Image (cartoon, rainbow, N blue to C red):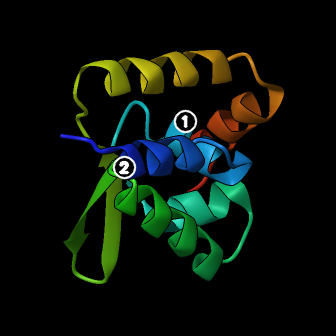
Amino acid sequence: MFRMRDLALFHAALADETRLRLLSLMQRREICVCYLQEVLQTNQPKISRHLAYLRKAGLVEARRDGKWAHYRLKKLDGDLEKILWQTLARLRRETQVAKDRQRLKRVGC
């Protein structure tokens, strides 16, 4: 059950462009941090910091595979799930998100 503090953290997590881009990339599948780093063309510490924020907010979960970390969207309850998916649906119309998806098709690690 989410408390007010958890709800504030959830919304704060959605209030950052980099985190929105990360969530959008994880929308359809689990994804390795190295791919996120390559697509967003930024350094690993920045990506990891944003992913930690998203984990703390309860939006994503991770699993380790050797030295690689893979992230995916976490199943949320009711209204929060709806808010997240409506946000991701709206992001599909953003030029930057479309560019990110195209870059993801081309990158490898």
Q: Which is more N-terminal, label 1 or label 2?
A: 2
108 is higher (above) or lower (below) than 92: below
Q: Secondary structure at mark 2?
A: helix
Q: Which mark is residue 24?
A: 1
Query: In the figure, residue 103 lies in which quadrant?
Result: top right
Label 2 or label 1, whichever lies nearer to me, is 2
Residue 7 or residue 108, whichever sits in front: 7
**Residue 104 placed where, x, y %?**
59, 44
Q: Is residue 46 visible?
A: yes
Q: Residue at x 41, y 42 (%)?
A: 7
**Residue 10 placed where, x, y %?**
45, 44
* Extreme residue toward the front, this view: 4
Q: Which mark is residue 6?
A: 2
* Residue type highlighted by circle 1: Ser
Residue contact at pointers 2 and 1, CB within 8 angstroms: no
56 is higher (above) or lower (below) than 12: below
Q: Residue at x 39, y 30 (%)?
A: 28
Q: Is residue 109 visible?
A: no
Give the alpha-carbon distance from disc 2 to disc 1, as whole Å. Answer: 21 Å
* Residue type highlighted by circle 2: Asp
